[in-house]
Image: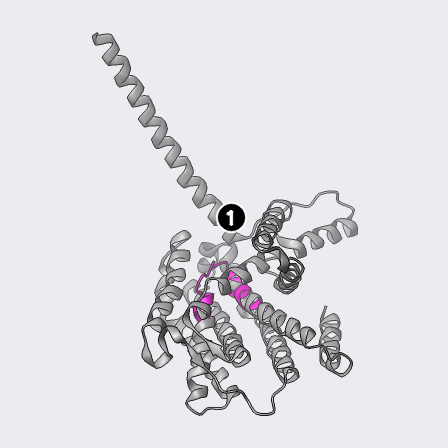
Amino acid sequence: MISIGLIILGVLFAAPTYVQINYFFHFVIILCIYITLSVSWNIVGGYAGQCNFAHSAFFGAGAYTTALLWNAGLLPYQAMIMGAFTSALLAILITPCFRLRGSYFVLGTMSLSEILRIVMLNWRVSGGASGIHLPVPEQFTITTYYYVAVVLTAFTVVATWFVVKGKLGLAFRAIRDNEVAAESLGVNPLFYKVISLVLSAFFAGLIGGFYSYYVLFIEPNNAFSVFWTAIPLFATILGGAGTMVGPIVGAVIYVGLTELTAGLGVLSLLILGIVLIAIVIIAPTGLVGLASRYAYGRRTGEKTVQRGVPTFIRSWLITYHKVGRESMTYFASNRKEKSFMIGETKNKY
């Protein structure tokens, strides 16, 4: 797997020598942004098992910090690094959200993006609803942006690989699989959850800063859009949560599908939705999980291998099943009570 990654990285670095098409550079840049977002979300969502919906807040915080510091006189690269650390600090500040469980944690993290969006809309320093326009860098071409995007993505993937293959990754997976058992063995769940969120936020803020550096304009409705959370979530589930390759495969498929269906308008969203539903039903562990099960079956000669559903998907299904069951019980009891009252009224007359 490492050799394949090195080959792909070498091809990407050599591509500008032979390809001089601006569309190709733009395509790879957008793909790198989505891969970085997906891999970073997978740290807290796939490995630690915490369904974080604040990813767009971290992305937007990095983008705005980069834009403000760049206009204040810092170099773009310095501003991007500061944007990443700002997002990591923001992740520490929302640590109390880990007191929530299930759908409440989702709502708590989701509200952060909306809060920051409203603040930036009404803050004059950030330009309000007009946003921030950035100066065009001198002697910068799209090839420069291309190389920066590839380097940032490679850095994110390599750093994440070292994290998940070490002690931190082992603690993340232990918390995801059974938090109570992990705590009984000496793992501090809150500490490692915060670490996973900080790492995820750092990389999201870093690529958010690059995004403002690339488009040279940032405004609240775009920077803090739920889009920057939904796409990494889609790509991670599609490729395989809790795997290293899954978010990358999912991001590649997503970008490919959006480009192929770009002329279909709203139908493109319908196609993406159908693909996601089909993957969740057919391969709950994603395409990488499906391929792993197939390879394992070929190697061992077993016909079937038990399928596992990622923790956060399973928790959602359990929560909604309980809510639906309680609602059905409530309505059934009301119906019985009403039918009993009607019967008593008929007996009276």
Q: Amino acid at mark 1?
A: Arg
Q: Is residue 53 magenta?
A: yes
Residue that appears at 68% across and 52% down: 290
Question: Quarter of the image holding residue 340?
Answer: top left
Residue that appears at 58% across and 71% down: 33
The C terminus lies in quadrant: top left
The residue segment tinted magenta is: 39-58
In screen coordinates, is 246 left or right of 44? Answer: right
Q: Which residue is mark 1?
A: 314
> Which secondary structure lies at badge 1?
helix
Question: Quarter of the image holding residue 233?
Answer: bottom right
The percent coordinates of residue 201 (x first, y second) are: 47, 71
Q: Is residue 201 magenta?
A: no
Location of residue 229 with respect to 131 vertically, above or below: above
- Magenta span dominant secondary structure: helix
For label 1, the crowd category at 10 Å Cα-Cα, with few meaning under 14, some 14 to 19 and many 20 or more, is: few
The percent coordinates of residue 165 (x first, y second) are: 61, 69
